[in-house]
Image (spheres, rainbow, N blue to C red):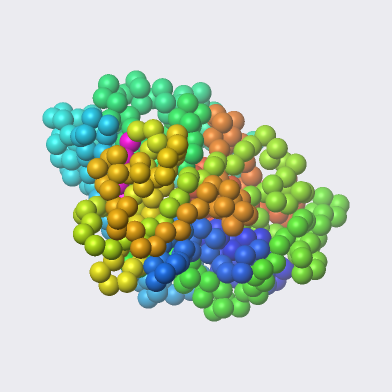
Amino acid sequence: MARVVVVGGGFGGLASAVRLAKLGHDVTLVEQAATLGGALSFETGDGFAWDAGPSWTLLPAVIRDLFRKSGRPVERELELVPLEVVREHRFEDETSVRVPGGSRAAQIAAFDELDPGLGQHWVDHVASFSDDWEVLRRGYLEHPWDPDSVPKDLAARLDSREVLHKRLRRTFKDERLRLVAGHPFVAEGHDLRNVPAWLGVTAYLEQRFGAWTVPGGMATLGATLAERLVTRKVSVLTSTHATDLVVREGRVAAVTTTAGELDADIVVCAVDPRRLPQLAVHVQRTMPAIPPVVSHLGLEGELPDLPHELVLHGDPMLVVRTGGLAPEGCQAWTLHGRGRLAEDMLRALARHGIDVRQNVVARVDRSPRDLVERWGGSPMGVLWQGRATVRRRLGPTTPITGVYAAGAHATPGAGLPFVGLSAALVAQAVGPA
């Protein structure tokens, strides 16, 4: 039985801890905040509750596998429900499209409503990533990989110079389709000129597997995993800051924390590696992606009927998410903003024809700096700076023997599926006790 210390109590840390505990290891989880969950938690105020981070997920099989491999099946703990519409996009020319998930035919119909013929263009683009998904899934996402030794078909993709910006400009004459295809990465703070073209596989995942949420908020997933720590007898130290690793003869021996030194045979870094000096030296050539500006809104009165997620394209780009918890007769919305935010986001929202300024009864604003300080790093993970980024990030292994990496900074994307897969990779790499 190995002594395992997991640094970080976000989704990556929680998933790693319960998997390793189920494999028979003696696991201690260290979290700097007073509560667990990280971005997978609730923001609360005046009787309202909003998802602090993600409000839906792709690849529900990742969550199902996590629960099955750590104890009771997810169906006994949570209700995962599909979203009929992944998101609605509204463009500056006042046209719009509601993009359904899980159905090629439904996507053809939706884009043909935008303009006849666009549906086939869209699904042809999506289909072009089917081979990429199979190669990435087998060699990179579902099996621990060595950046210095990868299969030829995987290397061809990871080392390709093609960026998503050029792929989309070559594929689509209609700028609106380029905006839809590039949105997931712009929303995470990336420049499409630096994002590898193969990451367009996200559109394939949305079409094939759909988007899923948990009634009452995705933060419920974090709370359920926190309860599973108790079942799996994981020791939890909250309000405890991990300051560095103790390395002896090239192998990890302990984690230094504000509560003292914790001996360790294995350490899982599920936070930004920059927080641990022994690991920081290995990621000096990467940068974190910056979170958006966020406003959580409690609203009352007559409100427009919006989908789970609405994207308002322009500069600034605004994203409205509905579906939080609210008192009777009220609604909880979350507003994200990116770009030139020279005015209050509610004023910017009103310029798009959605004026809810008189409906606000509660509001919680969070700047990118607030979020980074609260969670000890960016939940958006590593900023894409071209093809080399994929080999510069850590995970699942690291240059220090016995140290592994999970979480948003150890994956090619910040979403729950990638983070959940990173924890599965760590569990595979460590193995049973």
Observer able to see residue 432: no
Secondary structure mostly taken by the magenta-highlighted segment of the chain: strand
Q: Quadrant of residue 93?
A: top left
Figure quadrant of the C terminus: bottom right
Q: Please, is residue 158 above or below residue 205 in the view?
A: above
Q: Is residue 115 visible?
A: yes
Report the side of 88 relative to 418 (left or right).
left
Residue at image position (48%, 31%) is: 191
Q: Horizontally, is 300 left or right of 33 in the view?
A: left
Whole-percent x and y of residue 52? Answer: 46, 58
- Residue 184 lies, in percent from the top left, at 40, 41
Relative to 227, is 164 above or below? above
- Determine whether, in the image, residue 363 is placed left or right of residue 381: left
Looking at the picture, does residue 49 appear above or below residue 409? Answer: below
* Quarter of the figure that contains the N terminus: bottom right
Task: Point out residue 48 in the picture as x, y percentages from the top left corner.
Answer: 39, 67
Q: Quadrant of residue 393?
A: top right
Q: Which residues are magenta?
A: 309-313
Q: Is residue 249 left or right of residue 150?
A: right
Q: Closer to the camera, 56 or 22?
A: 56
Q: Is residue 298 above or below residue 171?
A: below
